[in-house]
Amino acid sequence: MSSYERQSSNSFLLAAREWQAIGGATGLMILNVILMYAVAFTPLAGINRIVFAVPIVGSLVYGAVITVGELLAERGFKNNTTPLTLVGVVLLEVGFGLFGGGILSFLAPDVRLLALGVAGVVTAVMTAGIGTYVYARSDTDFDHYGKIATGAFLVGLVAILAGSFISIVLLVGFVAIFLGFLFRLGYEMWEIRENRGLNTAMQAIGLYVAVAGVFVHILQLVVRALARR
């Protein structure tokens, strides 16, 4: 076996640290899916209808909750302050849980698990594909993915602002923010690969945020498809 083949093979052998980050993100995501399912049966599901009466308002509200939650969790890890970290994680879970639950509530109760299952499988496949790509290109620096993600989020918000008045533009906002989370997912995978960031737990949270962002966008597409049946 050539040195190149050995390097390529080893790039797919994850270290315990990497499995811990992926496992942590998976645990947070599973908890979030359970929360989404529960929220869909409660009056809390109506929050989406209220805040998204003006699309840019809903986007800013949920964007702020997720951003603040991640910042608090990061600060908690930096300062070794467990309560602050927990507050940040709870904000993230609640933010994605309310958003996903609101989306799910548009379906009849008997097909909600199906929607979550389909969205989960598609998200897992996309995550595995992006992860494989990042790890296969072991000599590539994916730091620019973070910048692309930020740019996509900004473009998405501008499009949603315009779409609040011209509804057809909302599709551009949806696509831009979806792409933003996909690039963020690639960036987080690269950070785990390179062992960047504060620690494994923070890497897990970063990966979870990216995966959850991808998941809720796929969930919207799945719900639309099932609602038309």
Image (spheres, rainbow, N blue to C red):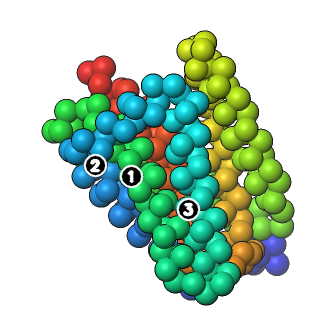
Query: Which of the two residues, 217 or 114, is positioned nearer the viewer here?
Result: 217
In the image, residue 133 above or below residue 122 = below
What is the spatial separation of the Cα atoms under label 2 and label 1, in whole angstroms?
Answer: 7 Å
> Which residue does the image show at 81% across and 60% down from the upper left?
143
Question: Which of the 4 image quarters holds residue 79?
Answer: bottom right
Q: Are marks 2 and 1 in contact (CB under 8 Å)?
A: yes
Q: Is residue 218 visible?
A: yes
Query: Which of the two residues, 18 or 199, is positioned nearer the viewer here?
Result: 199
Task: Say few, some or many: other residues with alpha carbon within 10 Å of mark 2 (under 14 / 14 to 19 / 20 or more).
Answer: many
Percent coordinates x, y for residue 228 in the rendering: 30, 20
What is the spatial separation of the Cα atoms under label 1 and label 3, in whole angstroms?
Answer: 13 Å
Q: Secondary structure at mark 3?
A: helix
Task: Say few, some or many: other residues with alpha carbon within 10 Å of mark 1 (under 14 / 14 to 19 / 20 or more).
Answer: many
- Image quadrant in which the N terminus is located: bottom right
Identify residue type, mark 2. Answer: Val
Query: Of callouts 3 and 2, which one flags the residue occurring earlier in the amino acid sequence?
Result: 2
- Image quadrant in which the C terminus is located: top left
Looking at the rendered structure, the number of numbered marks drawn on it comes to 3
Say which of marks 1 and 3 sits in front. Answer: 3
Task: Say few, some or many: other residues with alpha carbon within 10 Å of mark 3 (under 14 / 14 to 19 / 20 or more).
Answer: many
Identify residue type, mark 3. Answer: Gly
Furthest residue toward left: 110
> Which residue does the image show at 60% across and 12% down from the upper left?
166
Reading the image, the residue beneath label 3 is 69
Query: Which of the two residues, 62 or 1, is positioned nearer the viewer here?
Result: 62
Query: Of callouts 1 and 3, which one flags the residue occurring earlier in the amino acid sequence?
Result: 3
In the image, residue 102 above or below residue 67 = above
Reading the image, the residue beneath label 1 is 97
Residue 179 lies left or right of residue 83; in this view the side is: right
Mark seen at residue 39: 2
> Which residue does the image show at 28% across and 36% down from the upper left?
105
